[in-house]
């Protein structure tokens, strides 16, 4: 099925492309490759007037705003490096005229809860979210589930996201994401944007 995207009603949402996360080992796509593809998508979206949202996860130095529920496999709780939440420089902010990217800071996997993401999207008439980033089955999936429940149309850029194990990525891409939206490649999304530009 051909992918149609209206840039004026679309947001590219990039999950956790920050120093403390892109430095980790990822698979099946390297974090470096994911960043390169996300840069391509962001540049084209900005050229066509589509909104770019860069999401990062950050915590108070005290750690008191981090989730601490009892779980069988807790996340590491060691102190984070000073630059951990800094967004990668390759994804510059776009125009310096007030029309640039939106930065969303979250304190859990998903980017909707406890943030103004939904408000920012709705006030701009956004109906479609193109989502990418790290990690596929954590931040990307949590954000996508929330987007679906809020009736956004979701497009997953499979080769512009990755995880910590190939089976985690594959299960989300093959089993969960097709029930929440459409799974496409970077080339597919860029092609849809090019078609929209020529329309």
Image (cartoon, rainbow, N blue to C red):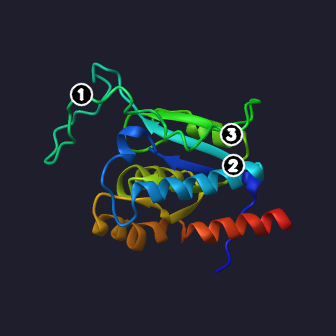
Q: Residue at x 73, y 46 (%)?
A: 125
Q: CA distance from mark 2 to mark 1?
A: 37 Å
Q: Residue at x 72, y 48 (%)?
A: 46
Do tag 2 and tag 1 residues touch (Cβ < 8 Å)?
A: no
Can residue 131 be seen at all in this image of the molecule? no
Q: Nearer the viewer, mark 2 or mark 1?
A: 1
Camera-nearest residue between 150 and 153: 153
Q: CA distance from mark 1 to mark 3?
A: 32 Å
Image height of 182 relative to 129, above or below? below
Q: Which mark is residue 79?
A: 1
Task: Count numbered badges in the picture.
Answer: 3
Camera-nearest residue between 8 and 23: 23
Can residue 126 be seen at all in this image of the molecule? yes
**Quarter where residue 80 is shown:** top left
Q: How many residues crowd around disc 3 within 10 Å: few (fewer than 14), some, or many (20 or more)? A: some
Which structural element holds mark 3?
A: loop
């Amino acid at each position: 099925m051909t992918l149609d995207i209206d840039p004026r009603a679309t947001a590219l949402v990039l999950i956790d492309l920050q120093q403390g996360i892109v430095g980790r080992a990822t698979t099946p796509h390297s974090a470096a490759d994911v960043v390169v593809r996300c840069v391509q998508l962001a540049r084209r979206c900005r050229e066509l007037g589509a909104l770019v949202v860069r999401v990062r996860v950050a915590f108070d130095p005290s750690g008191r705003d981090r989730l601490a529920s009892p779980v069988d496999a807790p996340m590491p709780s060691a102190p984070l490096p000073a630059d951990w939440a800094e967004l990668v420089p390759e994804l510059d902010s776009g125009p310096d005229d007030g029309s640039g990217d939106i930065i969303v800071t979250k304190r859990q996997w998903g980017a909707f809860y406890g943030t103004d993401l939904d408000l920012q999207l709705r006030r701009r008439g956004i109906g479609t979210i193109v989502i990418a980033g790290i990690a596929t089955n954590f931040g990307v999936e949590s954000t996508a589930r929330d987007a679906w429940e809020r009736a956004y149309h979701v497009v997953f850029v499979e080769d512009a996201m990755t995880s910590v194990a190939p089976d985690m990525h594959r299960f989300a891409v093959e089993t969960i994401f097709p029930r929440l939206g459409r799974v496409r490649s970077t080339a597919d999304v860029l092609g849809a944007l090019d078609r929209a530009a020529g329309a």
